[in-house]
Amino acid sequence: MEQGQGQGFSARRIDMPAGVFESSGSDGHIASLHVGPPIRATCTRGGVTRRSLQAPGDIELIPAGEPGRWVDEAPAKIIAIKIAPTYYDAVAQSMGLKGKAAFPSSPCVRDVQLNSIGRAIEVALARQTNARSLVVDSLGLAFSARLLELAHARTIERPSAKLSRRQARLVDEFIEANISERLALKDLARVAGLKPSAFKALFKSTHGLPVHRYVVGRRVERAAALIRERTMPLSQIALDAGFAHQSHLARAMRRTLGLTPGALARVHR
């Protein structure tokens, strides 16, 4: 388990065994980034129980003091990020945000920028250097600022039509289950019970990304999880994640994570 810490911000990589985990609430805000293979999990928070598929790149956000109970059906690999409320408030003030710095509570956030920063934190944790804490602290500032951007945007954006929770869940699970296959727009729209033109607009409103960019991001996450497992060559990983070939994967991963597959593999040797 690698750990890095700065002023008011800390992160550590945790290998969670399958089973039950309960928390009476943390003294800091928690962001849990799933970096392992997809698993089924049941979460109970705020009196609501939710069973879902946790996929690579999914981020659960838990405000300070909020209790919860989790049941993982398989071992999970996560980057656990803890942010002190005073640190979070200070970042909000530096950004000129007025009012209380709300920390969003969510069972699953999928945001390209947030995930990229989280992945950079993961890489920093794996490096045994004297500057690791400094790097983690600087990334902590970026991570907190992005969370504040998301929380603030949700308070000022106008309501817009989105996929229902059921539609979003069915589409997300279809993508994860068929990530190595060709995912045509018409097939995803059919899963949601919509026409392709209507589905495109509702999907982007729900996930904040066009369908193609979202799918590529999920393929990159699947490939990154397979690279960490170190059980197959990169050429096979590219195919299993739905890319045409290894070079195709390398271009997509560099754009999304800022790392090539080879560089990520070296970090996790």
Image (cartoon, rainbow, N blue to C red):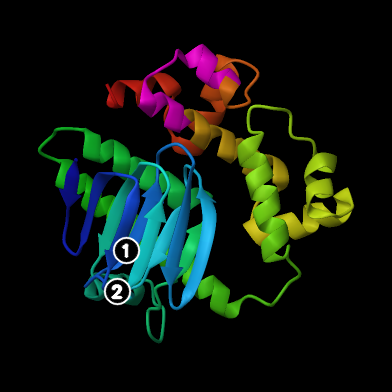
Q: Check the image and report above or below for 1 versus 101.
A: above
Measured from the top left, where is residue 220 in percent x and y?
Answer: 53, 33
Q: Is residue 148 magenta?
A: no
- The residue located at (10%, 38%) in the rendering is 130
Q: Dot 1, crowdedness within 10 Å: few (<14), some or many (≥20)?
A: many
- Label 1: which secondary element: strand
Numbered range of the magenta stretch:
224-239
- The residue located at (81%, 40%) in the rendering is 187
Q: Check the image and report above or below for 265 versus 98.
A: above
Q: Check the image and report above or below for 57 versus 92.
A: above
Relative depth, front residue between 67 and 10: 67
Give the distance between the C-alpha atoms of the residues marked 1 and 2, in whole angstroms. 7 Å
Q: Is residue 225 magenta?
A: yes
Measured from the top left, where is residue 60 in percent x and y?
Answer: 43, 59
Asked if disc 1 and disc 2 are in contact, CB closer than 8 Å, the reply is: yes
The N terminus is located in which quarter? top left
Q: Dot 2, crowdedness within 10 Å: few (<14), some or many (≥20)?
A: some
- Label 2: which secondary element: loop
- The residue located at (50%, 44%) in the rendering is 55
Residue 263 in sight from this viewpoint:
yes
Of labels 1 and 2, earlier in sequence is 1
Disc assigned to residue 30: 1
- The residue located at (37%, 20%) in the rendering is 230
Q: Check the image and report above or below for 67 versus 83.
A: below
Disc assigned to residue 64: 2
The C terminus is located in which quarter? top left
The image quadrant of residue 154 is bottom right
Could you tell me the amino acid type at mark 2?
Answer: Ala
Relative depth, front residue between 155 and 73: 73
The image quadrant of residue 99 is bottom left
Our reading of the magenta stretch's main secondary structure is helix
